[in-house]
Amino acid sequence: MLKTVRETPLLETLRKYGASVGEFAGWITAMDYGNPLEEHVATRNSVTVFDVSHMGRYLIRGDNLFEFFQKLVSKDLSKFKEGRMSGPVLLLNENAHIIDDVMLYYLSDTEWLAVVNAPNIEKDRAWMLRWAEKWGYNIAIKDITLSTTLIAIQGPRAPEVLEKLGVKEAESLSILEFLRRPSVLGEEAILVSKSGWTGEEVRSHGYEIMTTVEHGKRIFEAAVKAGARPAGLIARDSLRLEMGYPLIGVDIGSDVNPIEARYWMALSLKKRGFLGEEALRKIYREGVSRFRVAFKLKKGVRRIPRHGNDVLIDGEVVGYVTSGAYSPVLGRSIGMGYIKATHSYIGFKVAIDIRGKTYEAKILDFPLI
Amino acid sequence: MSAEDILVKTKLGEYLVKRGLLYTETDEWIKVQDDTITLGITDYAQKKLKYVVNVELPEPGTSVNAGEPIVTLESVKSVADAYSPCSGEVLEVNEKLYDTPDLINKDPYGAGWLVKIKPTEPIDESRFLSPEAYAEKIRAKEE
């Protein structure tokens, strides 16, 4: 299969700040700017700026968007309204397997925006259109990924940076609320939201700005000038791991159901009438055989648990690792993975086999910090 | 960077290839001095590996075979091995890497060296890549 590799529209700007580039999900973008551990710490203690333009973005227009998405996604949208983001919601198939987790933005009754994961840009669009057609909804989806940029400004000093960018009312936003067509550096952007997937958004320290490419370049540079340290996808990964946010295709995917993944924030188990509901309720009722959990290793262990490592008790495999990182905040390696439901001893110890050596780890719930 | 060193520029990045060293197909550099070989990873290798957080070195005195993994490098992103360029005995390892593994990122051809090996027999330099050949290899990989 021919692989398309795309560049983030901000790549040249990122290089000016010493970006070490690499590929993620078919995109060439900044992995780090020399020291991802410091970038991680700066996000927790100060402020950083990330280019997350590799995330897919669609404008969705139609007459019954609310009704359509209420049928399509796993989370109850009945309180969802103009000016709000949905939080992560799942696209499930009929068997309640995960197609993707996406973020919906309610722009108006007839216009929504969706931010989807980079590997699924084409797939999600086809999925939405397929079900719209099947159910008789007239919707149009415009992929605006390449014509726009998405910049995340994260950390306790993010409000200062937003102020310096001239964004009024940023501080008044609640979590997952956005300003439509705000002025940023004196020019209209598509939106500014309180969000970000680093964990800072839930501490009220995270904002994302969606705008045109040229405007995005100016905003990235102005954010750096205002004190935000450029940060890349490696820091973003360790930040989301500390929070326990799963990554599609790595921690969750078509082989996992949302109950096993304990992806509660993307689910409404009381909700009725959505795709995959019956299968999901059956799983909920009958139970699952594994659970997604966090792992914390001891201080001083230099190895990092990696995708596919076995989790053991007395030499018996009871689970596996799906992601791992070094947490500079905790000063140790951390991980995420699945453990047999019968062995989900939260707070208790297991061993993780990392390249042929076993290391003690504690099973924990999320978040780790 | 001295004037003679080669800076390979591709659409993915810029990679320094130093003169006076020999290179391997697996992105290590070696420096042959009397009967000692110093081994490290190249600037290209460290840039692909990203920020190194853990280095596992052999004990001095260990016997090694040509082509065998000799050092394990773990970055925030992935794990990679460096391979022994020859058969011989490990004379010395760069112990500074235990506390500051990112010396490999900061100075891959200098303070970030990995091990020194005493080869069993003299090195056949024709088995290694010249700086020019290695630079060409990087270019070919990235295009």
Image: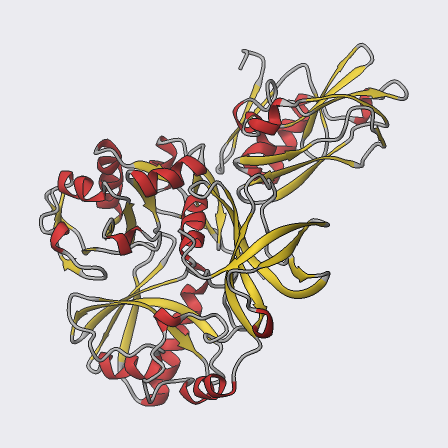
Residue A89 shows up from this direction: no
Residue A155: image quadrant is top left
Colouring method of the image: secondary structure
Which residue is pictured at 64% across the width and 55% down the height? Answer: A352
> Please, is residue B46 above or below residue A294 in the view?
above
Horizontal arrangement in the rendering, residue A295 relative to residue B38 (left or right): left
Q: Quadrant of the N terminus of chain A?
A: bottom right
Q: Residue furthest right?
A: B121
Which residue is pictured at 19% across the width and 56% down the height? Answer: A191
Foreground pick, A73 / A316 = A316
> Please, is residue B75 above or below residue A343 in the view?
above
Horizontal arrangement in the rendering, residue A75 relative to residue A79 (left or right): right
Image coordinates of residue A2 in percent, x first then y, are 56, 58
Image coordinates of residue A345 in percent, x first then y, are 55, 66
Residue A216 shows up from this direction: yes
Horizontal arrangement in the rendering, residue A166 relative to residue A122 (left or right): left
Foreground pick, A54 / A290 = A290
Image coordinates of residue A192 in percent, x first then y, are 19, 54
Which residue is pictured at 62% across the width and 37% down the height? Answer: B140
Residue A138: image quadrant is bottom left
Foreground pick, A129 / A267 = A267
Image coordinates of residue B49 in percent, x first then y, are 57, 38
How many badges with numbers are in the image?
Answer: 0
Horizontal arrangement in the rendering, residue B52 relative to residue A177 (left or right): right
> Please, is residue B9 above or below residue A186 in the view?
above
Which residue is pictured at 24% across the width and 49% down the height? Answer: A205
